Amino acid sequence: MARAAETRRRTRIQIEKEKDILEAALGLFSSKGFPGTTLDEIAAAAGMSKPNLIYYFQRKEDVYQAVLNHTLEDWLEPLKALDPAGEPLAEINAYLHRKLALSRSRPVESRLFANEILQGAPQIGPILSGPLRDLVAAKVKVIQGWIDTGRLVPHNPYHLIFSIWATTQHYADFDVQVRAVMGEMVDEDTRFADAEAFLERVFLRGLMPD
């Protein structure tokens, strides 16, 4: 019993330590990029020694891959939640809101993912052409079914999804530009509320059948 309890305790500690490492690495990779970040910096930011960090992740590439995998999992959740049994416009509106909320609450992850894509996706290329492609294809099939039954105007569902990605993630990836252009007089709550109302009107009116 004592040995079993000790094993469970180590597992909990490992989970906590890995979480600390990934949170520290996320901030560094997002701000400095993969080439500009070192294992020593990640260890220091996580509050541990480099040998301790290497116990969990032997290479910087392993840390980076783990951070990207966690980020991608989070960013795919809003699309996974698109319900085929739901009312089409309501489902698309809910997806739009979830994506914008994620951009507001997790901007660092969004910028890290964008930087990886701009570099040609060297670390997550297989995920993009595998699980991500499969998920998008499944949701495209759902949206196409709504179109075929006359509940949405005819369009290419892939471009609808791409457009939602582009417009919602803009507020995370280009936050500095948005704030600079709009000025400090527009606070964050107002900025996101206005964006949400505008995007909702554009997408839903454009998709509503005659």
Image (cartoon, grey):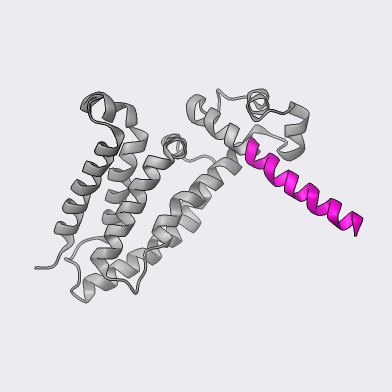
Percent across and percent down for residue 145 are: 28, 73
Image side of residue 197 versus residue 118, left or right: left
Instruction: Indicate yes or no whether the magenta region holds residue 164.
Output: no
Q: Is residue 84 above or below residue 160?
A: below
| Quadrant of the image occupied by residue 86 | bottom left
Q: Is residue 209 above or below residue 168?
A: below
Image side of residue 13 versus residue 199, left or right: right
Dominant secondary structure of the residues highlighted in magenta in the image: helix
Question: Residue at 33% across / 32% down in the picture?
Answer: 174
The mark tally for this picture is: 0
Q: Is residue 156 above or below residue 172?
A: below
| Quadrant of the image occupied by residue 19 | top right
Q: Residue furthest right?
A: 2
Percent across and percent down for residue 84 are: 35, 71
Foreground: 193 or 131? 193
Foreground: 60 or 203? 203
- Residue 124 visible in rendering: no
Question: Residue at 40% across / 66% down in the picture?
Answer: 138
Question: Residue at 59% across / 32% down in the picture?
Answer: 24
Image side of residue 62 versus residue 84, left or right: right
Q: What segment carries the magenta color?
A: 1-20
